[in-house]
Image (spheres, rainbow, N blue to C red):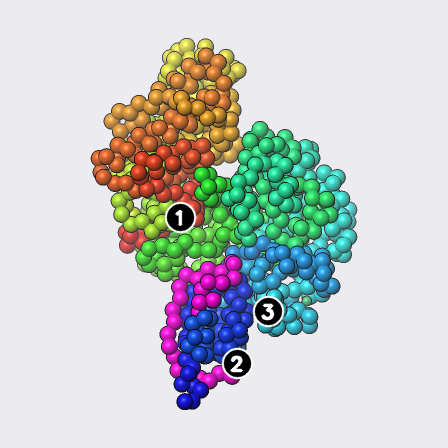
Amino acid sequence: MKISDQYCAKHLYIAGRVQGVGFRPFIHHHAKHYELSGWVRNSIAGVEICIEGTPENCRHFIHTLKENAPKASVVSQFHQKDTDLNHYKDFQILHSNNGEGEVTNISPDIAVCERCLLDIKTQEHRYDYPFTNCTHCGPRFSIIRDLPYDRKKTSMVDFTMCEACKREYKDINDRRFHAQPVSCIRCGPQYKWVSKTSQEMKWDKILKELAGFIKQGKIIAIKSTGGFQLICDAENQEAIMRLRNSKQRHVKPFAVMFSNIQSIRKFARLSLVETQLLQSWRRPVVVLQAISSPSQELNRGFSTIGAILPYTPLHYLLMEQISNRPVVFTSANLKGNPLIRDNQKALELLEQDHCDAVLYHNRQVENTLDDSIVQSANDHRIIIRRARGYVPEPVYVRGNVEGILALGADMKNTFCIGKDQRAILSQYIGDLDHYEVFQRYKNTIEKYKALFRFQPKCIVSDLHPQYHSSIYARQAGSNENHPSCKKISVQHHHAHIASVMAEHGLDEQVIGVAMDGTGYGEDGNIWGSEFMICDLQHFERMAHMDYLPLAGGEKAIREPWRIAIVIAYEIFGENYHEILFPVLNYTKQKHIQVLKAWQQKINIAYSCGMGRLFDVVAVLLNLLENADFEGEGPLKLENIHISTKASYPFCKSAGTYDYLTVLKGVFNDILAGVPASEISGKFHNSIANMIIQEVQTLAKNTGISKVILSGGVFQNRVLINNVLPALQTKGYQVYINEQVPCNDGGISLGQLMIASKKI
Ligand code: ZN
Ligand code: FE
């Protein structure tokens, strides 16, 4: 028998996240191990492999490939077919196949690995080198200009590898084999330090300056992988106050970078899930229950702390220099501006005295990425902001969504593009109300179109006619770049529910519960406490909370005391101030005008957003007057709550839940001297009871047992911990957002899914 009779040849096609995660070296290594010949190469669609060897070895190889793939890789599709023997002499890595058509998944940025951290203490050419990376770690999406993922299509193209790096890059047995961003002290990107008084290029000196500045309470803008951050000593009250002033961020807690898990434990309780989230290669900011705080100024009375572990060698080197002191770690942008990416913009911060030094480098940030924010509730991961470490990982959905561009909502914006069965959400972009952010939004859409070979056939926007994204959709249709583009608009809360359905592959009638802040309703009012029966095409609004009066129009969303005044008047009549003023220490003057305008119906609006009711209760408990950020009221109430069995009654008539009974209960308790923490606990229970009661009613009337919970209010952990298990115990299948935010950052996914069904 000839040898070739015992051999077989196979062609393998693998799609998923298989580029930039050490997949080809892994393939090469195991092909050698099983004495296979053939080749492997990257293609736009993923990785192609050809193997020749004994049938048994081929089988082993395929098994290993499926079971032991590198940790940041994801195999979403695997095809194999028999092919003719070519009698390859050995196993080779071939050049990329630059075909058009399908597009492979791009890896998100990966936090520096343990072995690279060791390398920066042992390798002479990488000693303390802040850009050290390997096939298992380092920047990916943030440096990619085009596909396939090769060095010449990243911002590393500006750096020519030295001999040592080239050797590692070419050595199949080296951890840096084909690591596209490979570099070292001699050939890679360099940091530069600029303060008001000095400039420095020498790295050891820079590190000392940096550490000195932090210890002196100064603020520094540093460039990491996805853009700039502002950092300062987390124990320095004055530094943080200055940072708050610069960012016009008066209340919202800042994230803190800690050197390791042990130092986080001093300030927060950690569950297993939270520990895993903190340590994962995605390295998000994790919102934790605080037991104390490095500084009062940091979280201004909030009981949570946002913690993040170092994710680049720079961060580790910094921690080492400052003896593991925690540092405030917040994105470098001033209010109304997108995250800073360019060195010049960061230097402007220095000129304007918003920081004392800038640490920048000469590698271009191709895709700007904020730090992601997650929390855990009921041992579920809840994503609050989805950016570095998660993007551009697709959500796999049912059916083909190719050619759909979903524009998202105007707040916490992300957009979403459809590629075959993948919904690719953009990174968090911000509030489109701001001109600069809107420019970044438009540019990012163009970038995605080029990068993912995407041409929109259908553009989906929110129902809100005045959203910037809706206006963009209207203009885009008349633009020659989008010829014959279909246009669809989708109701905000239907999109929230559909985002969960998309994640879980649901395509049927469900009970949707959207508890939210603000979303444009079909009746022109602001919605946000919706109970609906829906599928991916249609929804029917079955119940909601009664509309709250927004005295002063949408201004009342930022100034919820205006709502409280009108409601107090509704409850107590002319004598409302006798009840309200002792509670709130308000002066009468401030409110007379509001009430007058309300009575004359000047500039009024209505909202049934659940977030507004939380705001009003927060006002009545003296926790809030004007909201500095969206969700402040709910967060503050969550913070102070204590658990109790008691609740306030929620009366329902004709499909609406009347909040007045709840608020009367709150007033009575305040006047009776019940502690705010208990009132908050009772209030949370009231909302939970209302949700559970209505779900039961709808389930009984329709026979539907699948329940979807979404909308920004479900970021509230007390609420989700209350509602989710209770519904499950009653036998419902309950679904929540896991891969995308339940706030408006996940809207674009729902829009895309609804549009795919409608066209
Ligand atoms: Zn080098
Ligand atoms: Fe929303």
Question: Residue 562: x, y in percent?
Answer: 45, 23
Tell me the mark number nearer the camera, choosing from 3 and 1.
3
Identify the residue at image location x=45%, y=39%. Answer: 378
Q: Earlier in the sequence, mark 3 or mark 1?
A: 3
Identify the residue at image location x=25%, y=27%. Answer: 654
Question: Residue 392: x, y in percent?
Answer: 47, 55
Neighbour class for label 1 at 10 Å: few (<14), some, many (≥20)? many
Does residue 323 appear in the picture of this structure? yes
Q: Amino acid at mark 2?
A: Asp
Magenta highlight range? 62-90
Is residue 86 a member of the stretch shown in magenta?
yes
Question: Residue 517: x, y in percent?
Answer: 41, 34
Q: Amino acid at mark 3?
A: Phe
On the image, numbered disc 3 is attached to which residue?
177
Q: Is residue 345 left or right of residue 103?
A: right
Give the alpha-carbon distance from disc 2 to disc 1, as whole Å.
47 Å
Give the alpha-carbon distance from disc 3 to disc 2, as whole Å.
18 Å
- Rendered-image quadrant of the N terminus: bottom left
On the image, numbered disc 1 is attached to which residue?
748
